[in-house]
Image (tube, rainbow, N blue to C red):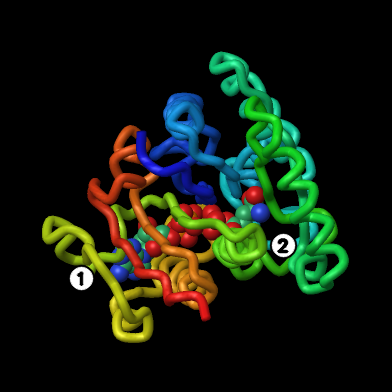
Amino acid sequence: MSTPQRIVLKFGSGILTKLTTPEPDPVQLRKLVEAVALMKQAGHSVVVVSSGAVASGLKPLDMQKRPTDMTTLQALAAVGQTHLMHAYENLLRDHGLHVAQLLVTHEDLAQEERANRVKATLERLLEFPQIVPVINENDSVAIEELRFGDNDKLSSRIASLWGADILILLTSAPGLLRDMKHPEEGPIPLVTDVDAVIHHAQEEKTALGTGGMISKLRAVQDAVNSGVQCIIASGRQAEQLPSVVEGGGVCTRFSARKKA
Ligand SMILES: Nc1ncnc2c1ncn2[C@@H]1O[C@H](COP(=O)(O)OP(=O)(O)O)[C@@H](O)[C@H]1O
Ligand SMILES: N[C@@H](CCC(=O)OP(=O)(O)O)C(=O)O
């Protein structure tokens, strides 16, 4: 068995929904939950940061596509978050696991006392091997993420706060591509300096994603600076996650800066 690691997994909206319609994809969710269960069986400590609240609210509110006004997005998230958690709880149960929901804002994490409470709660939850904490931003009270796609940043801050070994951003792309027009070349395998590759990130993103690759690279930069190794990989190939954690798989790996 490999050394147990503290792993933060971030699931972007684009990998939780169907490719053709913006509704949650149960097959995808099942595969992602299976990967979480496998990692826990391997002895790793796993925290999930999951987007998808807005996307999960579309169908119950009879909407076909993501709206742009903030209040409606917040209303969608309020409805969708419960659907999302219900889906996680049902899928985790098949593996003898349960979900623990944490909704936080960037302001919460910016205040030392609150951040320490979040950390303490996480650590207490992780003493129970059957629990999988799933974190999202508290979208009905904060708008930062809905506007900027800051679940990337949120996952990076959680990884630093918790002292994670690895942050894995699972998204619609197989990693950071050198050239979006030539995906067949595959992602850049190893990055030791985020600044040197930032120009490869394009503004383009998926219909439901809010962050895009630029937001991911900024989040990665913060995490590697605080000693967390980061990986960007395809969430549509969740079955390769155990291999990615072991140092293999198709992905972009960002080396952590040594802690001072
Ligand atoms: N150099 C790049 N390599 C890979 N993807 C890129 C790159 N530049 C921009 N992107 C875009 O970033 C998207 C991933 O971000 P986003 O849609 O916000 O996903 P998520 O919902 O997972 O946060 C990809 O689908 C792609 O369109
Ligand atoms: N908190 C929002 C997600 C915002 C966000 O960061 O989305 P994404 O760019 O898909 O990770 C939600 O749950 O819909």
**Is residue 194 visible to us here?**
yes
> Which of the pair 152/254 is nearer the observer?
254
Q: Is residue 186 above or below residue 62?
A: below
Q: Quadrant of the N terminus?
A: top left
- Tag 1 residue: 179
Q: Position of residue 169 (x, y in %)?
A: 45, 55
Q: Is residue 127 left or right of residue 19?
A: right
Q: Is residue 56 above or below residue 9?
A: above
Image quadrant of ligand 2 equals: bottom right
> Which of the pair 45/22 is nearer the observer?
45
Residue type indicated by callout 2: Asp
**Is residue 149 visible to us here?**
no
Q: Position of residue 218 (x, y in %)?
A: 49, 76
Looking at the rendered image, the disc whose residue lies closer to the viewer, 1 or 2, is 1
Identify the residue at image location x=22%, y=66%: 188
What is the residue that sits farthest to the left in this orientation? Answer: 185
Residue type indicated by callout 1: Asp
Tell me if label 1 and label 2 are in contact, CB under 8 Å.
no
- Tag 2 residue: 69
